[in-house]
């Protein structure tokens, strides 16, 4: 439950007041509208805070019977945010974060750029499938990216059955990593999934909601794929509680099993700071569907910098039209166009936060003397400074596809790398937000 309580009263015809039963807002009531849940630091979800990590680590040190192998997966957006605070490169911040967490008793520290490669590859394949069936399936396109949990909550709770068929079934990098850690890694270590305590470090609070979805709960093992989500800001809080500066933490060697690295440097993906979905799907689709090799994308800004589009034209005919839509105002415009049947797009990279994930509500806040725009630009620069890799060329990813997942496009890959979404039935009460 959230620590949010609402006192309500009803007015009688004579003007008298009658106190109603206290309303409680639970996790399932959250709309993830980038209001309280994404901006109020005091809002914490039970078992979704850094205190839970400390509890598990203390139990391990105390020698309790049910020992947990603690795994931390860090997002590149969080790494860049912390790097900006401590004036480090993103890779140096990653190495020092590895040292920090392992000093607390964490066994493995991974990088979700690795799991994002799976998300990008599956998104590419899903788009090709949807494009080829578009003539007999009117809801195949536009395909709407699904990596942002704030956007998913909004879609499920406000537009339900209408919008969900357009939403990609591909898991986000966080939940891809959840499947890899509780599935592949557990098998490699000869452990059951519940013997691993998996923590992710993310740029927004909504990732806590995503990890708590029933779809990502392993019923047989009675454990979530991601046990605990903490934000970049909460990592900063942990450092402060340990009376440490990340700049002074000794670096540790990177765990390369689930990390995208080149030597001692982290690698990333081309495209936006929200994952590069538009970039990679567009280039792949241009080649696979039309035999066109696209080396560089040209973005056209529409109503604002958070609404941009990219097109592929040949002989004056538009073959592909993609868009990046960030922030709820732009998302609402997109949804209204879909409802009127006037959306011209084949694919849309949808993110709830203005400026995308690098500007997530869980990122490290600017210091009093810092300007927020300048800090965001610094974070973007650090993020983009990493060497980019092409998902199709990552040998470790290919190996996992052909062994653990039984091959590209096989049923096991669809089962472990995809998910489903559910329309939430609206109830008639005064707490509903009308969009």
Image (tube, helix red, strand yellow):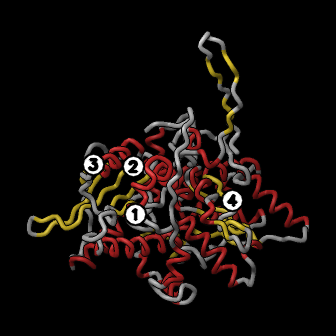
**Residue 340 tag number:** 3
Q: Quadrant of residue 23?
A: top right
**Relative to 62, 45 lies left or right:** left
Task: List x then y, in percent, for residue 413.
Answer: 51, 80
Residue at 58% of width from left, 55% of height from top? 207
> How far, Cα to Cα, is label 1 from label 4?
25 Å
**Relative to 35, 333 lies left or right:** left
Is residue 293 positioned above or below 61 on the image? below
> How far, Cα to Cα, is label 3 from label 4?
40 Å
Residue located beneath label 2 in the image: 326
> How far, Cα to Cα, is label 2 from label 3?
20 Å
Residue located beneath label 4 in the image: 228
The answer to whether the residues at label 1 and label 2 have Cβ atoms under 8 Å apart is no
Residue at 43% of width from left, 76% of height from top? 391
Residue located beneath label 1 in the image: 276
* Of the pair 83 and 227, the residue shown nearer to us: 227
Question: Which dot, 3 or 4, sits closer to the camera?
Answer: 3
Assess disc 1: are there few (<14), some (14-19) or many (≥20) residues with their C-alpha within 10 Å of its C-alpha: some
């Amino acid at each position: 439950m959230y620590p949010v309580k609402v006192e309500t009263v009803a007015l009688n015809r004579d003007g008298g007041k009658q106190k109603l039963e206290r309303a409680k807002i639970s996790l399932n009531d959250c709309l993830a509208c980038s209001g309280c849940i994404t901006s109020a630091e005091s809002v914490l979800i039970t078992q979704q805070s850094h205190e839970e990590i400390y509890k598990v680590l203390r139990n391990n040190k105390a020698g309790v019977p049910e020992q947990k192998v603690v795994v931390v997966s860090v997002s590149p957006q969080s790494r860049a945010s912390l790097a900006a605070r401590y004036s480090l490169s993103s890779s140096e911040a990653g190495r020092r974060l590895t040292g920090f967490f392992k000093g607390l008793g964490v066994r493995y520290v991974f990088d979700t750029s690795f799991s994002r490669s799976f998300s990008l590859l599956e998104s590419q394949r899903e788009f090709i499938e949807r494009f080829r069936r578009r003539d007999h399936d009117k809801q195949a396109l536009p395909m709407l990216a699904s990596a942002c949990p704030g956007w998913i909550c909004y879609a499920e709770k406000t537009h339900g059955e209408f919008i969900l068929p357009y939403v990609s079934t591909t898991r986000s990098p966080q939940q891809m990593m959840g499947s890899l850690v509780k599935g592949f890694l557990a098998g490699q270590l000869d452990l059951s999934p519940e013997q691993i305590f998996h923590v992710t470090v993310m740029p927004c609070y909504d990732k806590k909601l995503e990890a708590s979805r029933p779809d990502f709960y392993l019923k047989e093992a009675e454990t979530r794929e991601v046990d605990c989500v903490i934000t970049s800001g909460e990592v900063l809080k942990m450092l402060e509680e340990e009376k440490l500066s990340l700049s002074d933490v000794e670096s540790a060697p990177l765990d390369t099993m689930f990390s995208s690295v080149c030597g001692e440097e982290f690698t990333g993906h081309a495209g936006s700071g929200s994952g590069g979905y538009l970039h990679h799907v567009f280039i792949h689709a241009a080649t696979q569907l039309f035999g066109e090799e696209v080396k560089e994308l040209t973005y056209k800004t529409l109503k604002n910098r958070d609404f941009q589009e990219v097109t592929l034209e040949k002989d004056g005919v538009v073959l592909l039209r993609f868009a990046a839509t960030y922030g709820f105002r732009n998302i609402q415009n997109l949804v209204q166009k879909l409802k009127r049947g006037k959306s011209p797009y084949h694919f849309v990279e949808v993110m709830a936060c203005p400026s995308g994930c690098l500007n997530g509500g869980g990122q490290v806040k600017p210091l009093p003397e810092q300007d927020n725009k300048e800090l965001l630009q610094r974070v973007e620069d650090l993020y983009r400074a990493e060497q980019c890799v092409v998902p199709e060329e990552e040998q470790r990813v290919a190996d996992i596809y052909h062994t653990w997942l039984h091959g590209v496009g096989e049923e096991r890959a669809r089962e472990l790398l995809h998910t489903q979404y559910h329309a939430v039935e609206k109830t008639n009460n005064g707490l509903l937000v009308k969009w």
